[in-house]
Image (cartoon, rainbow, N blue to C red):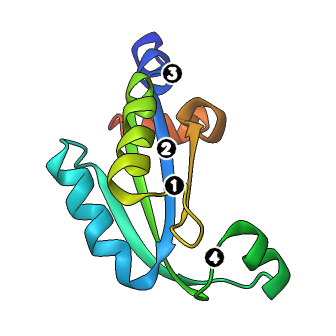
C-alpha cells in the first residue's frame, strides 16, 4: 500500500448506527443535513434473546443499520449529533459505535478503493 493510502486509511472511521426500522430515513437525513453524506443503510433483523435486547434498550427486532465513513477526527461530532438530535443514548433509541478503518481494512482492499486494482 502506498504511504498516501496508509495515511488515508488512518484518517477514516466507520460509524455503525443501529436503529428501529422506522428510524433509518430520519438517521440518514440527519447525517446528510450535517454534511456527513458518505453512508448507506440496510435492513436487518435482531437475533438476540429478549433479555439481551431489553438490556441493550432495543425493543423491535426489525432494524436499520446505517454505516457511515467519516474522518476519524469527526467521530466525536457524529456521536454528539446522534446523542443530541436522535437521542441515541436513551432506551430503545438505538446503538452507535465507531471503528477505525485501519483496523478493519486490509492492504488489498485499500488498494482497490484507491483504484489500484
Q: Is residue 101 above or below residue 94?
A: above
Mark 3–mark 1 CB contact (< 8 Å): no
Residue 81 rendering spot, x and y as whole percentages: 35, 44
Q: Which residue is mark 3?
A: 10
Q: Which residue is mark 4?
A: 58
Q: Is residue 27 visible?
A: yes
Q: Which residue is mark 2?
A: 14
Residue 14 rendering spot, x and y as whole percentages: 49, 44
Residue 98 rendering spot, x and y as whole percentages: 56, 42
SS under mark 1:
strand
Nearer to us: label 2 or label 4: 4
Query: Mark 2 to mark 4: distance in Å?
Result: 22 Å
Mark 1–mark 2 CB contact (< 8 Å): yes
Q: Is residue 10 left or right of residue 85?
A: right
Residue in the foreground of this view, choosing between 1 and 88: 88
SS under mark 3:
helix
Specify the label residue 74 is tagged with.
Answer: none
Mark 4–mark 3 CB contact (< 8 Å): no
Q: Which residue is mark 1?
A: 16
For the point 52% across and 42% down, the residue is 109
Quarter of the image holding residue 99? top right
Query: Mark 4 to mark 3: distance in Å?
Result: 32 Å
Of the image marks 3 and 1, the number of the one nearer the N terminus = 3
Query: Mark 1 to mark 4: distance in Å?
Result: 15 Å
Nearer to us: label 1 or label 4: 4
Q: Residues within 10 Å of mark 1 (few under 14, many from 20)?
A: some
Of the image marks 1 and 4, the number of the one nearer the N terminus = 1
For the point 25% across and 44% down, the residue is 36
Mark 2–mark 3 CB contact (< 8 Å): no
Q: Is residue 15 above or below residue 115?
A: below
Amino acid at each position: 500500500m502506498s504511504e498516501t493510502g496508509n495515511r488515508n486509511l488512518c484518517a477514516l472511521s466507520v460509524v455503525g448506527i443501529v436503529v428501529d426500522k422506522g428510524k433509518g430515513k430520519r438517521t440518514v437525513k440527519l447525517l446528510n443535513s450535517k454534511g456527513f453524506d458518505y453512508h448507506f443503510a440496510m435492513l436487518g433483523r435482531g437475533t438476540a434473546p429478549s433479555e439481551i435486547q431489553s438490556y441493550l434498550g432495543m425493543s423491535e427486532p426489525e432494524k436499520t443499520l446505517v454505516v457511515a465513513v467519516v474522518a476519524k477526527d469527526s467521530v466525536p461530532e457524529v456521536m454528539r449529533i446522534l446523542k443530541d438530535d436522535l437521542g441515541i443514548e436513551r432506551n430503545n433509541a438505538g446503538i452507535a459505535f465507531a471503528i477505525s478503518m485501519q483496523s478493519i481494512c486490509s492492504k488489498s482492499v485499500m488498494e482497490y478503493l484507491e483504484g489500484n486494482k
